[in-house]
Each structure stands twice: as C-alpha cells, then as structure tokens.
Amino acid sequence: MSRNFLIGAYQKLQQRLRHGDFHSGEDALNDAFCQLWAGPYDPASATEGEKLLSTATHRRQISIWRKERTHPQISLDNTNIVQSPPDTDAQETFQQIKLLIENQLTPLQKEILTRHDINDETYKQIAESLKMQEAAVRMQLSRARNIIRETYKKTKK
C-alpha cells in the first residue's frame, strides 16, 4: 500500500479550499495531513484516504474554531492587539485543571479524557479497547469536561 492516496486526498481538498477565503480551513487541512502522515495511517484506496483526511481536517477545524471563539485575536492591521496572559497565569491554570482532573474525575473519565484529548484517539478506538459503546465514551467525556468546567468556575469565584 502507498501513501499516494493520502497525498491525492490532500491535493483534492486543498484545491477545494483555495476556491474561497478559508485560511483556517487550509491550516486545518495542513495540520491534519501532517498528523496523518506522521501516524500509522496508510489508506488502502483514494476514497479511504479522502475520508480519513476529511475527518481529521474537520476535527482540526473544530479545534481551531473553538480556540478562536474562546481566545479571539485582533488583526495586526489594527492597533489593539490581544495580549496573551503571562506564562505564570497559564501555568497556574494548567496546574489547577490538572488537580481537578486528578481529584474530581473517575478513573474511567480520566482515561477517556487522556486518550481522546491528549493522545488524539477516536471515540471508536477508545470504545473498542474499553469494550464500551461509542455513545457511552462520548457521554463519559462530556461529563468529565462538564465536571472540570463547573468546578473550575466555582474555584474562580
């Protein structure tokens, strides 16, 4: 098998993105392609390569969109530029969230959160290895995120 299918899918999706002004879409495509190329993925057909890359691009685009929504940036053309918080604040926030994960989540929720958000495993992969339904994995991840979010909000008040 060859990675030519992945390259072909990349070129096809890149052409689609160039027909509009979708810079973040192209960024998502590039990120997804690099992630797939470095991973163990080796599609067996052009269709499989396109589906794989489309799914990875879609997920990356959602991540970019969420980041832009929660941390808006102002264009460099404007005079006001959003300043990033100092590293000490980021480190403190990271440590607080890490403690929340350790103290508030069940072992199953910790495992699912780590495998999905850090190791970038799919719901299907996690469900198969834990012998669970995909819907149950999604539900556990959603509950874990809600627990972290709500507990963190309470500590900030």
Image: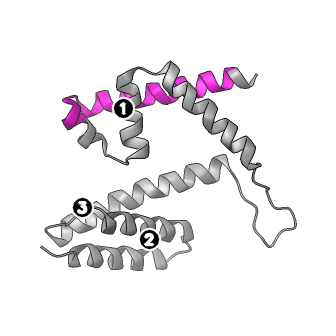
Q: In which quarter of the image is residue 128?
A: top left
Q: In which quarter of the image is the C terminus?
A: top right
Looking at the rendered structure, the kind of residue marked 1 is: Glu
Say which element carries label 3.
Answer: loop
Residue appearing at x 42%, y 53% in the figure: 59
- What x and y, as percent, mark residue 69? 64, 49
Residue interval drawn in magenta: 127-154
As measured in the structure, the alpha-carbon distance from the residue carrying label 3 to the one carrying label 1 is: 22 Å
**Which mark is nearer the camera, 2 or 1?**
1
Counting other residues with Cα less than 10 Å from the Cα at mark 2, is it few (<14), some (14-19), or many (20 or more)?
some
- Residue 76 painted magenta: no
The residue under the point 36% across, 32% down is 111
Q: Name the residue under label 2.
A: 30
Residue highlighted by disc 1: 111
Which residue shows up at 44% across the image and 71% down it? Answer: 30
Could you give the CA–CA distance between mark 2 and mark 1, rounded to whole angstroms?
Answer: 29 Å
Label 2 sits on what residue type?
A: Asn
Q: Quadrant of the N terminus?
A: bottom left
The residue labelled by disc 3 is 40
How crowded pointer 3 is (Cα within 10 Å; few <14, some 14-19, many 20+) is rated as: few
